[in-house]
Amino acid sequence: MSEMRYISTRGSAAALGFEDAMLTGLAADGGLYMPESWPQFSAADFAELRGRKFEEIVLRICLEFVGGSFSEAELKPMIDQSYSRFRHPARCPLRQLDNNLHLLELFHGPTLAFKDFALQLVGRMFAASLQRRARRSVIVGATSGDTGSAAIEAFRGLESVDMFILFPEGRVSEVQRRQMTTASDSNVHAIAVDGDFDACQARVKDMFNDAGFRQEFCLGAVNSINWARIVVQAAYFVAAALQLGAPERGVTFAVPTGNFGDVFAAYVAKQLGLPIDRLIVATNRNDILHRALTTGSYRTGPVSATYSPSMDIQVSSNFERALFEASDRDAPRIVELMCRQGGFEIPGDMLDRLRSDYVSGRVSENQTLSRIGDIHARTGQAVCPHTAVGIETAYSVSDTNSPVIALATAHPAKFPDAVRHATGTEPCLPDWMAELMSLPERMIRAPDSLPDLQAIIRERVSA
């Protein structure tokens, strides 16, 4: 298979193959990597995948994007190992919730969140790449909760990697925090930053934009800015659509999102040729994406703490990829927009293109709790607050005849306060994770300061 090349959304970084784009993360010009062109699946290609194991769907999609970096013989065992620890044989089972609404359960992995789908595989890809290059890498990431725990679980114990995860102190759930801070492996480090997620994300980008620091430590990134994650996540959109009749029948997805990575993975599936009628962008009261898509104004504001903390974001990194597509890949226009301080107005032609792919909604805290309570009362099933945001938005904005699939992005026990408040019942962690709440924690506290964070990394890596 010929090599797929990746270009930056800002146009001035060199084009790279998949492996280099994965290891690099953020492009040298500050942009995000995108495939030079979109592979195309025929209706027959999709139909051939119907009824296949999830691992086979992942393999088929990944092979379109990794050409020249990993062979099928290399990739297949990595994929099989990645999903062997998932606790459901279907990996991402689909459950009917209402007449035209289904839940895609993405919380059966080792950290009970959708981030496991990509990071379990990306961790193995990183390890293989670094080993054959005889190279060591420092991986830095920012998390609003679930990315950090999934990344630590995927990279813990790897000899070729030192991992540093920045999270906003006091703004993740206790389960999310403990999943990061109870890992005892010496190569992983959880850093509680005195700030919100946007501050953590900004400091990670600052490290990548410091050329000397980036080169000194061979920095890598595992946030959703890393293209490899987006590719893998596209697979569960394909798997879900096939279960409901694709490619002969279109579907609609409702995706709770803050950083736009997961809903952009659905867009990738659509670009492959999957018949997706609408992509519903579900936001909580940190609604910069909803405001951008409805008013055309992309302007940041203060971050409010909510029951759905993984979405408490006002700087949505992956939205740059959507803008790049909406501009017909006009990199100079993207540079001009992204370099404006405080935000920008989306040009009319780009806004029209965005609205042809995405529709959005905003969900309040009361609506979130009410929807959790309603689902529990009707079905006996508890859902996490992020999932409730997606379901509520699906009910409020969906006017399609196609089946709607809302993403259940995390296990409800990761957010017990919201579930308890809404239902009066306590969601329990699975038995195999029960010891989490009694394990000793290990974390580093740090101010929102680039020099301080860089000093922490230097000290821990040299040690």
Image: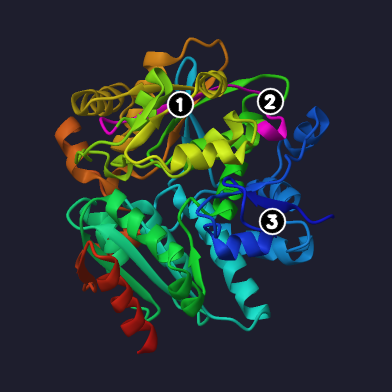
Tell me which numbered mark, 3 or 1, is placed earlier along the sequence: 3
Question: Can you tell which quarter of the image residue 422 is in?
Answer: top left
Rendering coords of residue 119 (x, y %): 51, 58
Circle 3 — which element?
loop
Rendering coords of residue 83 (x, y %): 57, 57
Q: Residue at x 43, y 23 (%)?
A: 293
- Residue 346's mark? 1
Membership of 347 in magenta stretch: no
Crowding at dot 2, Cα within 10 Å, few <14 / some 14-19 / many 20+, comes out as many
Query: Magenta residues, as a range?
Result: 271-286
- Residue 15's mark? 3
- Residue 11's mark? none
Q: Nearer the viewer, residue 271 or 177?
A: 271
Q: How far separated are the C-alphas under marks 2 and 3?
A: 34 Å
Rendering coords of residue 451 (x, y %): 28, 71
Crowding at dot 3, Cα within 10 Å, few <14 / some 14-19 / many 20+, comes out as some
Q: How far separated are the C-alphas under marks 3 and 1?
A: 27 Å
Q: Residue at x 78, y 65 (%)?
A: 73
Left or right: where 247 falls relative to 344: right
Q: Give amino acid for label 1.
A: Ile
Residue under pointer 2 = 246
Crowding at dot 1, Cα within 10 Å, few <14 / some 14-19 / many 20+, comes out as some
Residue 281 makes an appearance in the image: yes
